[in-house]
Image (cartoon, grey):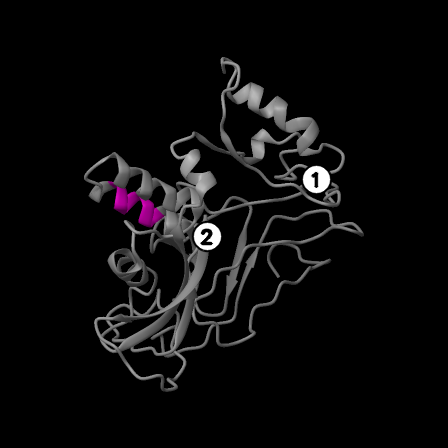
Amino acid sequence: MKFKYSLLACSLLSMAACTPVEDIYDEIDAEGVEIVKSCEEYVLTEADYKSISKAAKKNAQNDEQKKLAESVETELALNEFATADAYLPAVINQVFYSWTNGSNVRVTYKTRTGKTELETKYAGIEYFKLGNADYPEPDYGCFAPSASAAQELPKALAKKYPNAAANYRVLVDYKEADKEPEMSGEDIFSTDFELPSVSNNKPVELDGWTYITDNKDIVWVGKSFNDNKYMQISAFKKNATCDTWAIIPAQKVEKGVTFMFDLKVGHWNADNMEVMIAETFDGKN
């Protein structure tokens, strides 16, 4: 099967010329404000292909179209049934939902160009993609020299298909590292915001956390976007500045400890986020 990457200029409501525009605030905060953007670039993600696959399955009229719709998710590529013209506009309008008439974005995506002779021969064969739990080391998320695919894949298949008959065939999608992944230690503290206490536009109160701000009218609030909860603070439209701190419960930090976090920012326009470690903070000052 051959794939090719395509670049598509996709407009929101109408096409626009590529002219510079002023930076805007985070689109999540910009409710009620008309936003026109040009020349933004976007590459389709695995979640986007999954969303297109789901939409295409609803429009499938027969088994062949249903298989093509399902293949969008498994192959991470569009095809002759799930085409860019039919399904990309909905994705782009969802990603850039606050943009208005005249906005323009260039989209990179992968599309399947046709089946090879081998693929035609095995069309319809069952497809199995290994998840993290299917690997000997779930934290690796792949096979490795210490537990190679040649050694461990037959075990994974035997577990997945315990009643498989002789000569039963299945297409397997798996990952294998050339070198042993470096994994060490354990989490001393981790948190996310997928909690009942995190509600949209409501002040966030996480157990053990301390919030300090110099403006009592600006507080950390819960938010949700694409089924992911997070907390946010903003002085947008407040006609005021705000110096704020979100402080986690006290932890014992030793040499060699690594701090990691996931950060998603819309229209980042300032390097103004700091992560600091306090040695003398008493929970109040």
Circle 1 residue: 186
Dividing the picture into quadrants, the one containing residue 186 is top right
Q: Is residue 49 left or right of residue 133?
A: left
How many neighbours does mark 1 have within 10 angstroms: few (below 14), some (14-19), or many (20 or more)? few
Q: What predominant SS class does the magenta segment belong to? A: helix
Residue 134 against residue 2 in the figure, above or below: above
Dividing the picture into quadrants, the one containing residue 137 is top right
Circle 2 residue: 2
The x and y percentages for residue 57 are 26, 41
Question: How many numbered marks does the figure carry?
Answer: 2
Q: Is residue 32 left or right of residue 38?
A: left
Name the mark nearer the viewer: 2 or 1.
2
Residue type at mark 1: give it.
Glu
Residue type at mark 2: give it.
Lys
- Tell me if residue 150 is in the magenta stretch: no
Depth check, front residue: 270 or 172: 172
Residue contact at pointers 2 and 1, CB within 8 angstroms: no
Disc marking residue 49: none
| Residue span colored magenta | 51-57
Cα distance between the residues tagged 2 and 1: 42 Å
Residue 53 against residue 25 in the figure, above or below: above
Dividing the picture into quadrants, the one containing residue 218 is bottom left
Which residue is most to the right? 255
